[in-house]
Amino acid sequence: MSTATAIAHPNIALAKYWGKRAGEGNRPAVPSLSVTLEGMSTRTQVTFDAALGADEVRVNDALLEGEGAVRAIALLDRVRARRGEARRARVVSTNDFPTASGLASSASGFAALAFAASAAAGLDLGASALSDLARRSSASAARSILGGFVELAAGGEDPNAELAAHVVAPPEHMDLAVLVAVTHEGPKAVGSTDGMTLTRTKSPYFAVWIDAAPRIFAELRGALLARDFAKTGELAEASALAMHASAIAAGVVYWTAATLDVIHAVRALRAAGEAAYFTIDAGPHVKVLVPGARAEQVRAKLAEVRGVLAVRVTRPGGGARLA
Ligand code: PMV
């Protein structure tokens, strides 16, 4: 038996990835920029075992089935192919944050799986190769391999070409807290892959999003590097709003009444002088960007908003590592 364990953290995109290039290879249609968050982790152990007849993937003690299992096994197959490894694997993964935490576990989950599976197979991959491996299962996972502020370019023509995330700036680059306003318990209705496909095939605004996203990304990257908090926040909102507008036009509505109430609360806070900005992923929760020193005050305000079940305070943190 050969085994390895890795730890990875979720990330939140400031410039969103939404939409894949048509064809193979899970290539994003637009560039994205995210921040990796500390304080929440996925811990994944992979064991290649000759006694196993099939791969067995457990997440939080439950056997993974359906699309998630297919993607995890595809990642294991890629590792096996690289190494000439024939043994099947036992994967045991746990999140120390609840599923209804408002943060997707696929980014940290596939980042930890890529790291643990390659190490268990005896592959010593660098950050780029690990990021590329994770990206083929979940593009947001490519970014969770790295810490701090991280970018992932759009994919090119060749589905086999390496496409990996890169560090834009370390965690301490900007004094930032990300408040996660949880508005709903339970899984989302439409997964991100299905949501992206519907947007690409049905939204009259998909082409507009594809045109706007790289510009928003480039401007946000510049504002972040210049440590311009307000501009970074404004552009993060613009990215989330443009992404959701394109999705909504395809009938993909992730927002609930509570999502809108938090959006309005953030705007009211801003009108009152607070540097608070929102972003929203493929779900109803709202993430609020504030300067680190304002985290507790803004958290208390968000906790009072109708429909908010909990508010978690997170900060920029490090990338994936072996345990
Ligand atoms: O890679 P996925 O399937 O987790 O898609 C991520 C999509 C968003 O979270 C909405 C945006 C992003 O860039 O993380």
Image (cartoon, grey):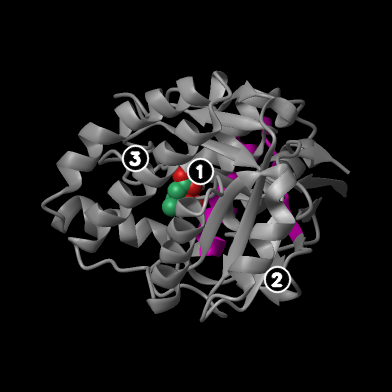
> Label 1 amino acid?
Ala
For marks 2 and 3, give the CA distance.
32 Å
Instruction: State the extent of the magenta-drawn residues as a range.
Output: 68-91
Q: Who is closer to the viewer here, 3 or 190? A: 190
Dot 2 falls on a residue whose secondary structure is loop
The amino acid type, in three-letter code, at marker 3 is Glu
Give residue 92's position: percent from left, percent from top: 77, 62
Image quadrant occupied by the C terminus: top right
| 121 w.r.t. 181: above or below | above
Amino acid at pointer 2: Pro
Q: Position of residue 122 (x, y in %)?
A: 80, 32
User: Could you tell me residue 235's position as x and y percent?
Assistant: 40, 37
Q: Looking at mark 1, is its residue's CB closer than 8 Å to ligand 1?
A: yes
Q: Is residue 192 magenta?
A: no
| Residue 19 can be seen, yes or no | yes
Q: Nearer the viewer, residue 154 or 220?
A: 220
Q: Is residue 122 above or below residue 255?
A: above
Q: Residues within 10 Å of mark 3 (few under 14, many from 20)?
A: few
When asked about the image quadrant of residue 171, the answer is top right
Q: Earlier in the sequence, mark 2 or mark 1?
A: 1
Secondary structure category for the residue under label 3: loop
Q: Residues within 10 Å of mark 1 (few under 14, many from 20)?
A: many
Q: Is residue 2 above or below residue 119?
A: below
Marks 2 and 1, how far apart in space? 20 Å
Q: Which residue is mark 2?
A: 98
For disc 1, the marked residue is: 13
Residue 308 rendering spot, x and y as whole percentages: 56, 76
Q: Circle 3 sits on which residue?
A: 24
